[in-house]
Image (cartoon, helix red, strand yellow):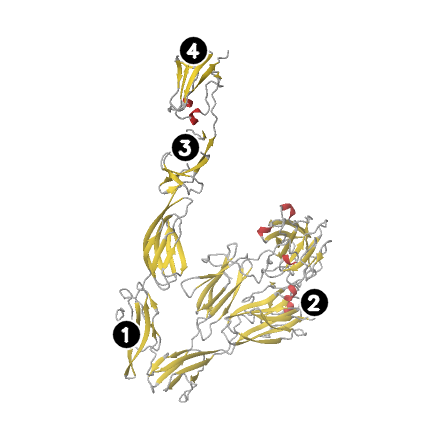
Amino acid sequence: MKHLPRLSLLLFISVLQFHAQNLLNNGTFEFGGSGVGFVIDGNGYNLLSPPYSGSSSAGNYAFVNNPQTINTQFFQSFGDHTSGSGLMMVIDGTTTGGQQRFWKAGNNGGGVCNLVVGQTYTFSYWIRTASNSVSGAGELANIGVQFNNASNVTLTFGSATAPIPNLGWQQVRYSFTPTNACVNIELFNNNTNAVGNDFAIDDMSLNPPPKPLDFTYSITQPNCSNPNSGLITLYPRGGQAPYIFQLQGAGPIPTTNDTGVFDNLPAGSYTIGLQDANGTIVSESNVVVNSISPLVITPGDTVVCPNASLTFTASGGGNSYTWSSSPLDLDLSVTNQPTINVSPNNSTTYTVTSNVNVTNMIYNGDFELGNEGFATQYEYLNPTNPTGAQRTYGIVTNSNAWYNQFANCIDHTLGDGTGKMMVVDGSTFNLGNDKLWCQKVAVEPNKDYLFSYRIMTVSLSNNAKIRVEINGQSLGVQNALNINCAWNEVNYVWNSGNNLFADICLIDQETSAAGNDFALDDISFRTNSNCTAAVRVTMVTVDPYFGFSYPLNICPNEAPVSPSLEPTFQTGGIFSADPQGLNINPITGVITPQGTTPGTYNVNYTAQICGQNATETQVVVIRPLPGLLQLTGGDFYCEGQAFNPLELVVTGTPNYTIYYNIDGVPQVLTDVSSSPIVISIGNQYGVYDLDSITDAYCSNIMVGSQTIAMNEAPVTPILGGDTLHCKDGNVGEIFPTNITNGEIRWYGTAQLTDYLGSNQTFLPNNQTTTTYYATNFLNGCESPAGSITIYIEECPFIIPTAFTPNGDGTNDYWNIIGLDEKYPLNHVTVYNRWGEAVYESLPGGYNQKPFDGKFKGAMLPSSSYYYVIKLSNEASVEPLNGTVSIILKK
């Protein structure tokens, strides 16, 4: 394999590695339980068998495709790691101490042998927490691993503690170096907590150090019916998955994929290669897909007048030709020549068949190219198998030379001891499901293929049992002969049906270590290959078919539309349209939609056939472009409040797709079907720009913009003012304390339904306790409401007989309670003993400046003073009089 300059490889994608050498048997748990590749011998572990009760106990385990099957209440529902639908081992965590082993490698727990001392191996498994009731990391399973006969044991990836439930499957990897050819590997659970300590484990693997990246490939050459039907399939070997594959050649653009399968290839020389996860690239050039001469008929399909003489000539394909006709043409007498001369009286199809030499479609089926052209899960040992390792093979000329315990046998192809064959030491793993040899072949649908191979036994007892699978379906199982060095041919017939590929695999179902050793050679896949081609002769009738067509629906803004012409199209005619108004070229039939009036037109083509004019008609509909009639809604809205959405009114044919953007961010509204259409495109604030509209047939540019702005809600009023008043007394105005602009609106209910008016202040009533609400209306938006409660009380009218104006903050004023409230026209005068007025109140406002015991700024002496309280201006209301004492404390 050549290591060429780096190919332009673009991405990493996983691909199945047939060659991956997992040294553990039944690591996927698909092939059995304890005793098949591993054992469980820990105390406290008990196997559950179906049917399951749905209630497991500590130490119970089972091999299921869903953990919830064995514990419906406390286990999660999920699929296995291998495929999502296969088996895994599910364990209800043990409460038995002592590091009880729930998995030990080997059919009898004896570990894995045939390891190379000093090399670095990787042991891995996938684990997932099954419990749905984990409250902390201390409840999770903690998986311990014991390696015997090994050094340098290192946890290289993952954690010994099982993942928390929502992390799903997690891989754990260890590396180690064998100090003996056999190494024991044992797993146990260090956590014996009964709660949450439940887990599933799957895909156990033991892998030797990765080999250098390499690949092989197979080629299926094109068939004679299709010169572009070549196939190249790549099979990776070594390196580190995932891989990407690339093919270059026979075209300007490289092809990259994640399968390694490149089909529908024309003849040419290709460069193929792959890259692994480490970035290593290998490639090979001059991979040749052979050219083939396809079977063709000249001339092709034709339209003729009755009794016309025709000559058809076949070329390409194989080395012989056979003609037939449908319906039967009795004048077709010479059918085995490349050229026929016919004069049909009605429409007839003439078919020619060309036989091709049968070739083997298997690449390197005789192994003469060496270890090339196939995928395998066996290990390739070259030049010998000195220890008789199981699940291995070699490409050799003599089986005894590869392993000295095998018989002295030679290949089948040449039979002279110089030819090569595949010698196999059979697998003892996976219940006979390891794939020994696989190759992908391109096939033609609905054909019978003969698959065959040669097999011989090279070591007696427990002879190989070879199962053949194509596309995953078994064709049968055949035992090798119980005779050393005797070749036996095995054959199967397979019909391709609708398949375009045949994935062929050979699998040895015998898993006994004694014997089960054999050789393969001359693998073959063949068909009675032939090519066919046909030509149609259409006889002109009074109702001819000219073989032209247009799209049924055309949009006025499309580019010019040409008619589609079939091989039978009769040239030389004239195109026309009915009614007038369609822009059509009368010679070419090209329709120019621009400037054409929308509507339904009959496009006629008239040509002369066999001496008379004939006309064929096709219907064409010029659809009107969808258009914008009206754009409404939007403008602005207030924060926290609804508004009418932006709406479009358009014309056209449902269903519609509207393309627009909000503040430059593209948006799309799809599958709108109402008609006439009013399309709501939302009430998100921003600038809406309309781009285009597409209806069921056409698309049109729309021009329109609408700004939806969001105004912030005005500030909520904070209301102030006196909140306690006497009934029927004077009350003060209430007012917002934090509003400098905007209109204040007053309401009597929290629902803002009882509108009381708008003003910066509001005078409450003096009859009952009431809560008032006020909002701020600014820039078209109204704020949330603020509120204040005015309390109205029944106030007593009390005239104190004395007070102490000594400045101590207590009883410093002659406070006449309830006077202003009850008698808003009151007037108070206080006199000394000489009849001089020492105090006079404001009319109706005594409490605004009550008597403080001073006269002309000086404190009056302690004494009794005479007062007169005039309650009203009406003479019918008698004034009150009496004395009040000023007491100055010493």
Q: Earlier in the sequence, mark 2 or mark 4?
A: 2
Mark 2 or mark 1, whichever is nearer to me: 1
Q: CA distance from mark 2 to mark 1?
A: 84 Å
In the image, residue 122 above or below residue 223? above
Tag 2–tag 1 contact (CB < 8 Å): no
Q: Amino acid at mark 2?
A: Ala
Q: CA distance from mark 2 to mark 4?
A: 144 Å
171, 131: nearer the viewer: 131
Q: In the image, 528: left or right of 869? A: right
The residue identified by callout 1 is 575
Q: Earlier in the sequence, mark 2 or mark 1?
A: 2
Mark 4 or mark 1, whichever is nearer to me: 4
Mark 2 or mark 4, whichever is nearer to me: 4
Circle 1 — which element?
strand
Where is residue 111, by image quadrant?
Answer: bottom right
Q: Earlier in the sequence, mark 4 or mark 1?
A: 1
The residue identified by callout 4 is 833
Label 2: how many Cα within 10 Å (few below 14, some 14–19, many 20+): some
Q: Earlier in the sequence, mark 4 or mark 3?
A: 3
Circle 2 — which element?
loop
Q: Residue at x 34, y 68 (%)?
A: 553
The residue identified by callout 2 is 514
Mark 3 or mark 1, whichever is nearer to me: 3
Label 3: how many Cα within 10 Å (few below 14, some 14–19, many 20+): many
The residue identified by callout 3 is 734
